[in-house]
């Protein structure tokens, strides 16, 4: 049976991607990463807040040695990208010589990733790739090579599975889109 819509503040959201489909796509990405990074002990860099649930499920599916670190970057207010990417906050780990996999909830315009990658390169990472739960190919405004997207979606605003609307909705197990 289809799940009913949910209301968050002034907006209604309808079910879009069910949990089982999300988890299946996470397994596939984890299998690819486990294969590609064998012997490299990758450092996952989870971009907070949105990617915490994806990062957690991704780690559980990894079958090789890997580490995780967290950082914060905020470029979004309400439902629109501000286009401004802030500096990395809270990254204490030395990433010099490390194989870094940035873990994102969603790549929308690509401003965040386009701003972040040069900062990580400056810190001396040996390699940098991006694993994202969702990508909106129609909104991309940068030439980015996102090697590990779990799922592609249309240009809709989504919540759930870590993604929020004004801080709410992150606890939903499924992904919902605005109606
Ligand atoms: P970008 O810099 O690629 O435009 O956007 C990246 C960030 O914007 C994401 O990490 C995410 O936090 C936020 N974002 C983009 N699209 C959505 C969306 O549909 N729903 C939610 N909740 N956040 C989004
Ligand atoms: Mg994000």
Image (cartoon, rainbow, N blue to C red):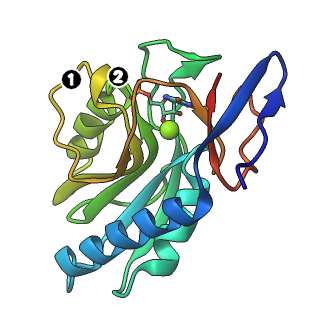
Decide if residue 105 is on the left or right side of residue 56.
left
Residue 111 shows in the view: yes
Ligand 1 within 8 angstroms of badge 2 C-beta: yes
In percent of width and height, residue 90 lies at: 55, 46
**Could you tell me which residue is drawn at 38 percent across and 29 percent down?**
112
Decide if residue 118 is on the left or right side of residue 163.
left
Residue 162 shows in the view: no
Rate crowding at label 2 as few (under 14), some (14 to 19) or many (20 or more) other CA atoms within 10 Å. some
Question: Mark 2 touching mark 1, by CB under 8 A?
Answer: yes
In percent of width and height, residue 58 lies at: 47, 69
Rate crowding at label 1 as few (under 14), some (14 to 19) or many (20 or more) other CA atoms within 10 Å. few
Residue 109: numbered disc: 2
Ligand 1 within 8 angstroms of badge 1 C-beta: no
The quadrant the N terminus occupies is bottom right
In percent of width and height, residue 131 lies at: 34, 54
User: Disc 2 or 1, which lies upstream in sequence?
Assistant: 2
Q: Is residue 146 above or below residue 82?
A: below
Residue sitting at the far front: 1
Instruction: Provide the residue designation for mark 1.
Output: 142
**Could you tell me which residue is drawn at 59 percent across and 55 percent down?**
18
């Amino acid at each position: 049976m289809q799940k009913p819509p949910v209301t968050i503040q002034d907006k209604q959201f309808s079910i879009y991607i069910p949990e089982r489909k999300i988890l299946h796509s996470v397994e596939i990405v984890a299998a690819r990463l486990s294969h590609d990074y064998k012997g490299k002990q990758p450092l996952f860099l989870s971009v907070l807040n949105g990617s915490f649930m994806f990062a957690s499920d991704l780690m559980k599916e990894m079958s090789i040695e890997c580490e995780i670190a967290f950082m914060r970057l905020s470029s979004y207010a309400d439902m629109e990208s501000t286009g401004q990417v802030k500096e990395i906050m809270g990254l204490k780990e030395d990433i010099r010589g490390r194989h870094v996999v940035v873990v994102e909830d969603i790549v929308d315009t690509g401003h965040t990733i386009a701003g972040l990658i040069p900062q990580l390169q400056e810190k001396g990472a040996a390699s940098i790739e991006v694993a994202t739960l969702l990508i909106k190919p129609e909104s991309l405004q940068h030439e980015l090579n996102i090697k590990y997207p779990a799922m592609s979606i249309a240009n809709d605003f989504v919540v759930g599975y870590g993604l929020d609307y004004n801080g709410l909705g992150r606890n939903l197990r499924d992904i919902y889109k605005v109606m």
